[in-house]
Image: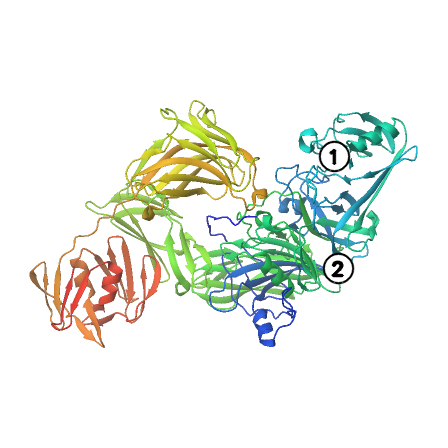
């Protein structure tokens, strides 16, 4: 669960509006601000602090704010919160998502989900587990060994059947619900016995367990031990290599010994009408002494609470799922029950936990999001926010890249991802989950719901749907219901179920059918809300006929990151002609003599620019004719190979560089290197980016390149923060050119796995590289500068030594010197434009787009909103700007002689 440096991507999730309490439509890419819920917060928030002053308690209350609530089904609802990591300035926000389950409601239940339906062995995404098991919501659950057989580390009771026993590991708590619907969080051990026909008995060590090292003795789990494997175990059973033990196995069907394999394994998987005993050492001796083919045999086993000694037979538990350390006990942060160094205790990560309230009537399933719009939390923060949620007792479940919550929106038939995972929309494959199920019958129609986007841009169209739900909050087919749609304010037009936004602001969309109705808050984002706008051109090269991808993203003043749809943008082109098709620009003709082309995107008074100029793309290596050595090396006991391999791509004759690695050995951060030409291969010129094709292995390991610059300094460049794909994929990464001294050498390409969170990544794999090339910056020439001399109050100036008359003189007003903008900037090679309606002046010079408005202190430079102490003014129909604005934003050198009242611009 290591904190990785992630390539941030703007992702927008469409959050559904609540039918019961419409507080806030909170999207991961867009949210509508509304009044928060008032929540009760217990006085104690940590193990170290039992008593707080009322002022401190009030401060704590402000850290966790409920922002959204929606029913999932009768007895279960989703509540979203925002968590502040501290009170006051500089606080960072995390999104917290909670499924509240009311155990007093007979129409809802909890149970374990498995990655492979009907089996304890196998992986699946949380979403697939929810779908395949018929759940209405779910989260990932138990920890697991990523190098294992897809088996949870803890115990599991599913549907009242003990499927797996707990491991002999210190402090691994589990969450359970008893048959009488009481929640439990406890430490459990396994107690079981095999009884032979002659009455001899032998203790069972467990049921359906992969081989592992026990704690605290660091022993082999299957040594001198007897385990039962049932039909739920579909993977190969632990062999001598897995467990350092040679097994003797016994096949049992219908209580009769059918086969004994001495010092060997029985082929196949355990039968549905029996099980396989896997024995070793003393347990194998028991088999030889007391078991015979054809004789009867019986087994019995149960779970035992390590804290109370109570025995739990299978029929006493509805469900149980394993976890990790205890987090909260008696409403306070608890001391960790086991070492947490391997689960990023101090890192801001995604987290999953489950707990219940003091009277045991409500279970709270909690995830914390780690994404573009949420920082994640450390373990101490997780404890605090659980306490503030009113949790009495809680256990930590698998987090980091595993954290996933899936919920069914009200009125919908299918569940969907509630929040982004650490991999965005990709759900990590895990062996188990905790599911929420409805047992309610079909009810009568209760209400309808408007479903669709809660945030739009001006000019954007969005279609909305009407959903319906019954008295148990389960979806029903709207059938003959005929919806009518209405928009509250004149921010756009509604035609049928399609809304077209025309003006910024907030409004309400209402859907009505007969006597039932619903309202959906709508926010239309305006230019005044934008702090920064960027054209993310994939290759800003000015070349006739070239097609570029030019999506436009924005960061709003409140920190939200969104993408503006193409239909909401207006485009201007300077220095070239072109056509826009969605987010794609195709360059037509290039203006003769143009030093650069300017692609300007405008949205509701805000603007940004992409400067296009002549650039180059140079091939570096395709590995078809390599004449230099490429060698493998590894750190901390890492082994592997590197070599040229053909047949990995569609071109069977083409070579690629394949790097295979095995991180099994050693400890700490591990890396496998493919070193080029010893100390590195020379890179021509001063590139700004590198592109290569990479054959991924979905290992989630880092992919990096190491460069050595002219000064001998090493620069580590992340090519992919996680290898989360299979097949070929082209990567393009910008180089830290501002920190490099050219020329460069590409020394090596490597796969790495840092110590923190290694359990989340594959320990072995193979990747390949091909078609490495470097991109060189599109050069935008600095416009020629001409020396200008001006004098306060005089319309005469000297430009390059030549006397020139201006329309308006420089002005000293209120201690601020104003210069005539058009005269000065055009003399310096800039292009100036005036927009009369908006009172906006636009200046294009070099790589800068500067836009200002008369009377406004705010201005925009290359898509970034900034503020000046003094606003531009007009005199004689000409725009005058403060001298500092010219010098700082256009890169001009301006000197002021106060005694003579003269100004020089260079």
- Assign the C terminus to one quadrant of the image: bottom left
Residue depicted at 52% across the width and 43% down the height: 754
The mark nearer the N terminus, 1 or 2, is: 2
In this rendering, the count of numbered labels is 2
**Is 342 on the left-hand or right-hand side of 91?**
right
Residue 436 percent across, percent down from the top left: 70, 53
Give the residue furthest to the front. 217
- Quarter assignment of residue 684: top left
Residue 362 percent across, percent down from the top left: 72, 61
Q: 549 or 513: which is nearer to us?
A: 549
Q: Which mark is residue 223?
A: 1
Q: Nearer the viewer, mark 1 or mark 2?
A: 1
Q: Residues within 10 Å of mark 2 (few under 14, many from 20)?
A: many
Q: 9 or 822: which is nearer to us?
A: 9
Q: Residues within 10 Å of mark 1 (few under 14, many from 20)?
A: some
Which element is circle 2 on?
A: loop
Is there any visible trace of residue 482 in the rendered image?
no
Compared to residue 35, the image places residue 340 above or below, namely above
Q: Which mark is residue 51?
A: none
Give the residue furthest to the left. 802
Residue 221 percent across, percent down from the top left: 72, 38
Is there any visible trace of residue 304 in the rendered image?
yes
Residue depicted at 56% across the width and 41% down the height: 761
- Quarter assignment of residue 254: top right
Q: 132 or 296: which is nearer to us?
A: 296
**Is 316 on the left-hand or right-hand side of 369?**
right
Which element is circle 1 on?
A: loop
Q: CA distance from mark 1 to mark 2?
A: 42 Å
Discs 1, 2 touching: Cβ within 8 Å: no
**Is 442 on the left-hand or right-hand side of 486?**
right
Residue wearing tag 2: 103
Q: 509 or 902: which is nearer to us?
A: 902
């Amino acid at each position: 669960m290591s904190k990785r440096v992630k390539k941030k991507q703007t992702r927008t999730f469409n959050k559904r509006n609540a039918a019961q309490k419409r507080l806030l439509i909170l999207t991961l890419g867009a949210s509508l601000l509304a009044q928060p819920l008032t929540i009760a917060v217990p006085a104690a928030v940590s193990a170290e602090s039992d008593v707080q002053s009322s002022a401190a308690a009030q401060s704590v209350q402000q850290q966790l704010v409920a922002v959204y609530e929606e029913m999932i089904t009768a007895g279960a609802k989703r509540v979203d919160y925002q968590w502040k990591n501290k009170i006051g300035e500089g606080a960072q926000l995390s999104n917290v998502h909670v499924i509240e389950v009311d155990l007093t409601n007979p129409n809802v239940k909890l149970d374990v989900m498995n990655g492979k339906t009907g089996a304890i062995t196998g992986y699946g995404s949380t979403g697939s587990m929810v779908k395949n098991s018929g759940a209405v919501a779910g989260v990932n659950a138990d920890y697991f060994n990523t190098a294992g057989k897809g088996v949870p580390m803890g115990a599991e009771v599913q549907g009242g059947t003990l499927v797996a026993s707990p491991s002999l590991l210190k402090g691994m708590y589990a969450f359970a619900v008893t048959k009488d619907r009481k929640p439990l969080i406890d430490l459990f051990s396994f107690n079981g016995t095999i009884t032979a026909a002659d009455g001899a008995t032998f203790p069972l060590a467990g049921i359906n367990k992969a081989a592992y090292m026990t704690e605290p003795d660091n022993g082999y789990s299957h040594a001198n031990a007897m385990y039962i494997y049932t039909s739920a175990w579909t993977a190969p059973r632990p062999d001598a290599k897995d467990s350092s033990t040679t097994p003797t196995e016994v096949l049992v069907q219908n209580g009769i010994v059918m086969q004994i394999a001495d010092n060997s394994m029985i082929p196949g998987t355990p039968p549905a009408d029996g099980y396989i005993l896997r024995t070793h050492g003393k347990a194998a001796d028991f088999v030889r002494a007391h078991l015979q083919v054809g004789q009867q045999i019986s087994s019995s086993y149960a779970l035992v609470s390590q804290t109370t000694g109570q025995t739990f037979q299978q029929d006493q538990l509805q469900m149980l799922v394993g976890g990790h350390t205890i987090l909260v006990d008696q409403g306070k942060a608890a001391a960790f029950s086991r070492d947490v160094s391997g689960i990023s205790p101090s890192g801001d990560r995604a987290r999953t936990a489950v707990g219940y309230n003091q009277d045991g009537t409500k279970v709270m399933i909690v995830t914390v999001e780690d994404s573009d719009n949420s920082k994640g939390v450390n373990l101490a923060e997780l404890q605090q926010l659980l306490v503030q949620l009113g949790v009495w007792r809680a256990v930590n479940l698998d987090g980091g890249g595993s954290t996933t919550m899936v919920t069914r929106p009200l009125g919908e038939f299918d569940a969907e991802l509630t929040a982004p995972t650490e991999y965005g929309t990709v759900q990590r494959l895990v062996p188990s989950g905790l599911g929420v199920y409805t047992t309610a019958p079909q009810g009568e129609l209760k209400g309808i719901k408007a479903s669709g986007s809660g945030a739009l841009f001006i000019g954007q169209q969005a279609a909305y749907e009407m959903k319906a739900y019954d008295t148990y909050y389960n979806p029903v087919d709207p059938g003959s219901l005929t919806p009518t749609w209405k928009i509250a304010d004149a921010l756009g037009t509604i035609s049928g179920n399609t809304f077209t936004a025309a003006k910024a602001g907030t409004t309400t969309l209402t859907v009505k059918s007969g006597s039932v109705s619903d309202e959906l808050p709508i926010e239309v984002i305006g230019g005044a809300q934008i702090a920064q706008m960027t054209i993310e051109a994939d290759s800003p090269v000015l070349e006739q006929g070239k097609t570029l991808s030019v999506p436009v993203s924005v960061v709003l003043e409140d920190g939200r990151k969104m993408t503006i749809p193409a239909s909401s943008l207006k485009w201007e082109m300077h220095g070239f002609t072109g056509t826009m098709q969605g987010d794609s620009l195709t360059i037509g003709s290039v203006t003769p003599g143009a030093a650069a082309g300017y692609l300007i995107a405008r949205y509701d008074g805000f603007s940004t620019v992409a400067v296009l100029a002549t650039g180059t793309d140079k091939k570096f290596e395709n590995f078809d004719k390599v004449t230099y050595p490429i060698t493998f090396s590894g750190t901390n006991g890492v082994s592997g190979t590197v070599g040229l391999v053909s047949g990995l791509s569609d071109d069977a004759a083409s070579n690629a560089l394949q790097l295979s690695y095995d991180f099994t050995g050693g400890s700490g951060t591990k890396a496998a290197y493919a070193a080029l030409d010893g100390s590195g291969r020379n890179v021509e010129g001063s590139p700004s980016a590198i592109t290569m094709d990479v054959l991924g292995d979905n290992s989630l390991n880092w992919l990096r390149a190491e460069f050595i610059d002219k000064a001998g300094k090493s620069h580590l460049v992340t090519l992919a923060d996680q290898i989360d794909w299979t097949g070929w994929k082209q990567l393009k990464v910008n180089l830290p050119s501002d920190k490099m001294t050219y020329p460069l050498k590409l020394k090596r390409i490597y796969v790495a796995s840092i110590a923190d969170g290694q359990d989340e990544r594959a320990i072995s794999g193979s990747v390949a590289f091909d078609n490495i090339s470097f991109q060189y910056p599109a050069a935008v020439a600095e416009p020629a500068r001409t020396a200008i001399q001006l004098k306060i109050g005089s319309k005469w100036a000297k430009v390059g030594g030549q006397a020139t008359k201006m329309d308006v003189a420089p002005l000293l007003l209120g201690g601020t010197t104003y210069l005539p903008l058009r005269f000065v900037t055009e003399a310096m090679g800039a292009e100036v434009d005036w927009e009369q309606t908006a009172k906006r002046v636009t200046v294009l010079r070099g790589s800068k787009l500067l836009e200002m408005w008369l009377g406004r202190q705010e201005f925009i430079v290359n898509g970034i909103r900034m503020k000046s102490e003094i606003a531009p003014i007009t005199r004689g129909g000409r725009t005058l700007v403060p001298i500092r604005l010219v010098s700082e934003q256009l890169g001009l050198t301006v000197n002021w002689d106060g005694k003579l009242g003269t100004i020089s611009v260079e």
